[in-house]
Amino acid sequence: MNKVTVIIPNYNGLQFMEPCFAALDRQNYRDFDVLVVDNGSEDGSREWLEEKGIPTIFLDSNTGFSGAVNVGIRSVDTPYVILLNNDTEVFPDYVGELVRCMERFPDVFSASSKMIQSADRELLDDAGDMYSVLGWAYQRGVGQPARGYRKPCQVFAACAGAAIYRRKVFDEIGYFDENHFAYLEDIDVGYRAKIYGYKNVYCPTAKVYHVGSGTSGSKYNGFKVRLTARNQVYLNYKNMPWPQLLLNSIPLAVGVAVKYGFFCRKGFEKEYLEGLKEGFSTLGRCKKVPYRSEHLKQYIGIQWELICGTFLYVWEFAKRRIRKL
C-alpha cells in the first residue's frame, strides 16, 4: 500500500489541470496515489478527468473546499494525505520531502510546504500560516525573497493549498469544518490539532509554485471578504475557551476595527460587515471545542503564540513596505 494520497479539490479549474498533473508525473518519489474531488464543475473538467482516467469523485454540487477535501480524506486509507490546490506546480521532490518530514516527527499533524508565487518566482507566497491575537491569519513570508525561509520550524497551521496531514489524527480532532465552506478552514483544523497537543511544521525542502486565488479569481472580492469575516468569528468562538475569549476581546475588537478600515478603502466594507453579522447570527451551527483541563498547557502555549504572531505580522509587514521603497 502506498503511504500517501494526493487529494486535489477542483471547481472549474480545467485551465490548471495540465501543468498540475504534469508536475505530479515528474515526482522522484512514486509511492503515492492521486484522487481528485470535483465540486460539480461545469467547465469541461469532468470530461478531461474522465478522458485522462484520473481517479475522481464527482460531486453533484459545489460543497466548498472543506466539503470536497473531507470526502477525499474519508475515501482513502493511506497514512498520510496531501491536499493540493489545482493551481499549483510541485517540484520533483515535493511528495517525497513531505513524507520524509512526517516520518521523522510522529507528533506532527501537518507540514506546510514552501509555496512560491507562480507569477513572480523570486518571491514567496507562503511559508506556513500564522495567527495573531488580533484575529488575523496571514501567510508567513509572503512577498519576501524565495531564496529565504530555508529552515524548518513550527508554524501555527499548514496552508491546506499544498500540505501533508497525518490522516488518523482527523478521527481524534475532527475534519475540516464544512460550515466554513472555504477560507480559514486550514487555520481552524491546525488550531484544533494544537489544542490536542500536535504540532504543525514548515518543510522548506518541499517546494511548489502557486498561482493563488485560482478558484475565487482574485485576492480581494466580495465573496471572499464575506466568508473570511464570517469564518473569523467561527474560528475564535470554536477554539478559544470563554476565559480566553474574554482575555482577547479587546485585541480582537481592535483587529476588527482595523480590518473594517482597510476594507473601506478597498470598497468591501459592506461585505465585511455582512460576514461578521452572519458569523455572530449563525454561531449555533458551530461545534465548540470542549474544554479539557489536560489541554491547559496547550491553551497557554497557544496564547503565547497568538501574541508572538502579532509581532511577527508587524515585522513582516514592515519588511514588505521597506522592499517597496
Image: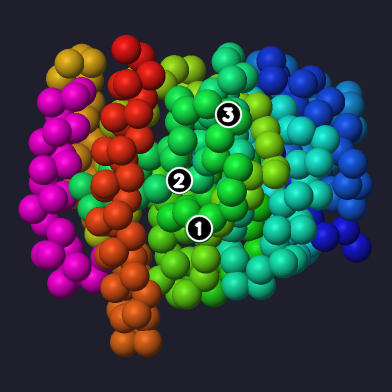
Query: As displayed, is residue 70 above or below residue 199?
Result: above
Name the residue located 11 percent from the left edge and 65 percent from the top edge. Answer: 246
Residue corresponding to mark 2: 129
First of labels 1, 2 by sequence position: 2
Q: Which of 311 and 83 is in front in this view?
A: 311
First of labels 3, 2 by sequence position: 2
Secondary structure beneath dot 3 equals loop
Q: Which amino acid does label 3 sit on?
A: Ala
Name the residue located 59 percent from the left edge and 66 percent from the top edge. Answer: 108
| Residue span colored magenta | 239-263
Residue corresponding to mark 1: 154
Residue 268 is covered by the magenta coloring: no
Q: Is residue 185 visible?
A: no
Residue corresponding to mark 3: 146
Q: What residue type is labelled 2?
A: Asp
Q: Which amino acid does label 1 sit on?
A: Gln
Secondary structure beneath dot 2 equals strand
Q: Is residue 30 visible?
A: yes
Q: Which of 288 and 189 is in front in this view?
A: 189
